[in-house]
Amino acid sequence: MIMLEKIKAIKEEIAAAQAVNKEAVEQLRIKYLSKKGAVSELMSEFRNVPAEQKRELGQKINELKAFVTERIARLKESFELADEVAADDIDLTRTASPLPLGTRHPLSLVKKEILRIFAGMGFTIAEGPEIEDDWHVFESLNFPPDHPARDMQDTFFIGRTPVDVLLRTHTSSVQTRVMEHTRPPIRIVCPGRVYRNEAISARAHCFFHQVEGLYIDKNVSFADLKQVLLGFARQMFGPETKIRLRPSYFPFTEPSAEMDISCDICGGKGCGFCKYTGWVEILGCGMVDPNVLKACGIDPEVYSGYAFGMGIERITNLKYKVKDLRMFSENDVRFLREFEAAH
Ligand code: DAH
């Protein structure tokens, strides 16, 4: 009987036993399971037990031994786990896992480069709203009332009262925004997104990006325009780049021109990229029409100026040979990652 009580007592003791650390667990192991431990002691006492009790007591002692062994193993395990976690928490020398970093979008890279070049020539940055009114996008820029660009087919109209509200179709609207509030000299570049009602394809998109340029002062001439654009083309596409200006028409400039650069793929000899002309078109430009100056309260008898506008996608096409416009807005990371090195 005494033995049964001892077994019960040890079981209760070990069931309630706690340990503050691994050493305390080891103490428990010694106390119960070592050669001189409580369980071993029971085993030696077992030898003196009368034969008829041996079966029952033997079973109980074996059960107790298994219980104690299991309990101590569990306690030990919990400290090993805690050790691991603690070591993890404080290992300041461990290499951090790499954070996946994004890359700059190719259009942002090219926009930044365009703005950097013009900043070097004294231009400051101006921006305007994407949601505009008819006055800033068309009327102030000398578009006749029946000009096709005003047509629903080109322009996304948002509302019609009291004035037409629309998504700007070009960043030339920022010219007027600035000229209304600033007196010359004005020398600005205006980056931004523009919208046109076009079916999306490799060569057209319903939104794209432009940089507009404007310089208004006394005695600004076409020669100034040409020099600035030549400087831009050489910095953007390399010092050997040639430019040529072809007469063109825009309502807000007179005279107007379109500028080509020598094809940097064939060096001007003619290839598939430049359609065997040796030249690729990159922007529109001209001398600001006196009507535009007047519309903004600037006296065309005193001031003159030039303006130019280019598509950022177009410049990016030329610089990085991206053929399909849709790539710019699909955000396929495999495409975007290709510009990592260009940072
Ligand atoms: N706004 C024109 C367009 O979207 C581009 C342009 C042409 C801007 C000639 C100008 C310019 O300032 O002088 O096609």
Image: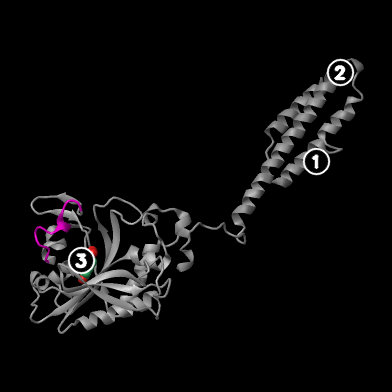
Q: Which residue is mark 2?
A: 55
The disc label shown at residue 30, or none: 1
Going from N to C along the chain, the mark reached first, 3 or 1, is 1
Q: Residue at x 12, y 80 (%)?
A: 303
Q: Which residue is mark 3?
A: 172
Q: Residue at x 83, y 21 (%)?
A: 57
Mark 3 in CB contact with mark 1 (< 8 angstroms):
no
Which element type, helix, strand or loop, lies under badge 3? loop
- What range is drawn magenta here? 142-153
Q: Position of residue 239 (x, y in %)?
A: 39, 81
Between 212 and 41, the residue placed more toward the observer is: 212
Q: Residue furthest top?
A: 52
Is residue 282 in the magenta section?
A: no
State whether the magenta stretch is mostly helix, strand or loop.
loop
Between 294 and 3, the residue placed more toward the observer is: 294
Q: Is mark 3 within 8 Å of ligand 1?
A: yes
Name the mark nearer the viewer: 2 or 1: 2
Q: Position of residue 339 (x, y in %)?
A: 46, 63
Is 246 on the left or on the right of 342, as rendered?
left
Between the residue at mark 3 and the residue at mark 2, the CA separation in whole angstroms equals 103 Å
Q: Residue at x 74, y 33 (%)?
A: 70
Q: Is residue 171 visible?
A: no
